[in-house]
Image (cartoon, helix red, strand yellow):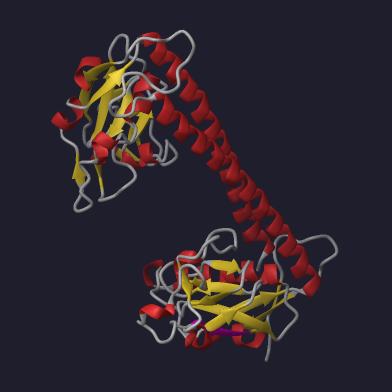
């Protein structure tokens, strides 16, 4: 078979030979998993003593399976099912197509996954895992609309794999493995701070039936007072900006995407239709069923920069109400989430917002609590930025170090 000669943009020192492209069939021996047999029999699974049964949902991030699979396969079904040793590459063929993992434990696999059993050419496992990941992403982009429902065996046989020599494969594989390990470490740090925040939220704000929180700053002993939102803040709705969106305008349009991404996703306007001022809150009023944006808050930190879109509320804290305390208190509060029935778009009304009732401490205690969570959320933001930087770095290297 005639092969094309190719080279990547970035390489490790000492490697100059050109890469070769091969059809996947000429590189690897692979097979799909299977449904447990006898399929549909309740006796095919055993949650207590069974072996892990890997499905699409069990293929996680950074080339790993989840620690505990959703289902376990019983001894009854194992003889007629596809077994996978530790250290084998799997790729999802349906649903979230192209997710890749190197198995870290023995398991059986569903037919929605492809197993690479062995190779016909010298192959480094980590290099090949990243190559397969990029390969499936490339094939998805070729499909109409950028999506495909499943990958067929016929399509697989035509896929092209680009290979350098085995030593260069090993260098590339080790490089990205270490990068993924760094990302995993930073992700765990982020999750640890987020868990800490959740614990403080539970202890520093009142639970139902409580008059004082479980954890307080020294010197504060008074009971918290219950009040409706309209007693502590003023409320208004945003206005439509669809006709005023520009590529790079003077003002940022505060919409649900902007709030739900903590300001990372932006649209712009050259007209400040509904100005937002420093110290005000933006509060999401509408979301899809079971969405993550409903009732999310964003604190405005600058004047003359933001303009409030429709279906977003502008909330102005009154005197003796701390902005950051109110931001934390209202953010995704269970009172607002109960209006989401899981069917149809949820739209919070003016009355829903103004009738929100909660407990408030003194202004001085509000400020202490608000400042505490401000510092904690700054740590979360900083940690997220570290993780995002690593992710961006990885994507850049993937573009430059692979053909």
Identify the image quadrant of the C terminus: bottom right
Q: Nearer the viewer, residue 230 or 282?
A: 230
Instruction: Name the residue located 47 percent from the left edge and 84 percent from the top edge.
Output: 76
Tell whether 119 sits left or right of 380.
right
Q: Name, please, the residue furthest toward the right.
A: 14
Q: Residue 374 at x, y = what percent?
A: 47, 24
In the rendered structure, does residue 391 fall within the stretch colored magenta? no
Q: Quadrant of residue 315?
A: top left
User: Is 171 displayed left or right of 211 in the figure?
Assistant: right
Q: Position of residue 287 (x, y in %)?
A: 26, 45
Residue 371, percent from left and from top: 47, 19
**Which quadrant holds residue 255?**
top left
153 w.r.t. 280: above or below? below
Residue 291 image point, x, y percent: 31, 48
Where, quadrant-wise, is the N terminus in this rendering?
bottom right
Q: Is residue 159 visible?
A: no
Q: Residue furthest bottom?
A: 1
| Residue at x 29%, y 40% (from the top left corner) | 294
Q: Is residue 31 magenta?
A: yes
Q: Nearer the viewer, residue 18 or 328?
A: 328
- Would residue 123 be seen by someone viewing this image from the given angle? yes
Quick check: 325 left or right of 233?
Answer: right
Q: Magenta span: helix, strand or loop, mainly?
A: strand
Left or right? Give the position of 356 relative to 257. Answer: left
Of 322 and 284, nearer the camera is: 322
- Residue at the extreme front of the image, as rendered: 49
State the extent of the magenta-drawn residues as a range: 29-33
Vertical position of residue 329 compared to residue 322: above or below: below
Write the residue at 21% across / 15% down. 231
- Looking at this view, name the residue that lies furthest to the left: 351
Depth check: 332 or 203 in front?
203
């Amino acid at each position: 078979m005639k092969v094309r000669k190719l080279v990547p943009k970035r390489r490790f020192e000492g490697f100059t030979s050109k890469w070769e492209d091969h059809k996947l069939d000429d590189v690897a021996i692979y097979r799909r998993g299977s449904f447990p047999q006898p399929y549909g029999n309740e006796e095919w699974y055993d949650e207590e003593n069974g072996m892990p049964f890997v499905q699409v949902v069990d293929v996680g991030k950074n080339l790993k399976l989840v620690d505990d699979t959703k289902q376990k396969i019983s001894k009854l079904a194992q003889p007629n099912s596809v077994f996978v040793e530790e250290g084998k590459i799997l790729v999802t063929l349906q649903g979230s197509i192209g997710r890749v993992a190197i198995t870290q434990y023995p398991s059986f696999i569903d037919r929605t996954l492809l197993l690479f059993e062995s190779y016909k050419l010298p192959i480094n496992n980590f290099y090949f895992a990243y190559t397969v990941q990029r390969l499936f992403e490339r094939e998805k982009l070729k499909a109409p609309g950028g999506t495909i429902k499943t990958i067929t065996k016929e399509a697989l046989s035509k896929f092209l794999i680009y290979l350098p020599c085995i030593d260069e494969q090993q260098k590339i594989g080790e490089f990205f493995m270490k990068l993924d390990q760094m990302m995993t470490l930073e992700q765990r740090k982020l999750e640890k701070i987020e868990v800490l925040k959740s614990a403080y939220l539970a202890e520093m704000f009142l639970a139902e039936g409580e008059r004082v929180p479980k954890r307080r700053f020294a010197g504060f002993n008074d009971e918290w007072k219950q009040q409706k939102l309209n007693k502590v803040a003023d409320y208004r709705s945003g206005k439509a900006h669809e006709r005023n969106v520009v590529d790079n305008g003077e003002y940022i349009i505060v919409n649900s995407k902007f709030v739900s991404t903590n300001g990372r996703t932006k649209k712009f306007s050259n007209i400040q239709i509904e100005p937002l001022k420093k110290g005000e809150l933006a509060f999401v009023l509408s979301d899809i069923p079971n969405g993550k944006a409903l009732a999310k808050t964003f604190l405005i930190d600058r004047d003359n920069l933001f303009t409030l879109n429709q279906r977003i509320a502008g909330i102005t804290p009154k005197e003796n109400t701390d902005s950051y305390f109110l931001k934390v208190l209202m953010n995704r509060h269970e009172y607002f989430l109960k209006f989401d029935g899981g069917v149809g778009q949820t739209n919070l009304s003016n009355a829903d917002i103004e009738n929100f009732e909660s407990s408030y401490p003194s202004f001085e205690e509000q400020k202490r609590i608000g400042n505490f969570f401000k510092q904690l959320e700054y740590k979360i933001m900083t940690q997220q930025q570290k993780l995002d930087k690593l992710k961006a770095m990885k994507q850049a290297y993937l573009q430059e170090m692979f053909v």
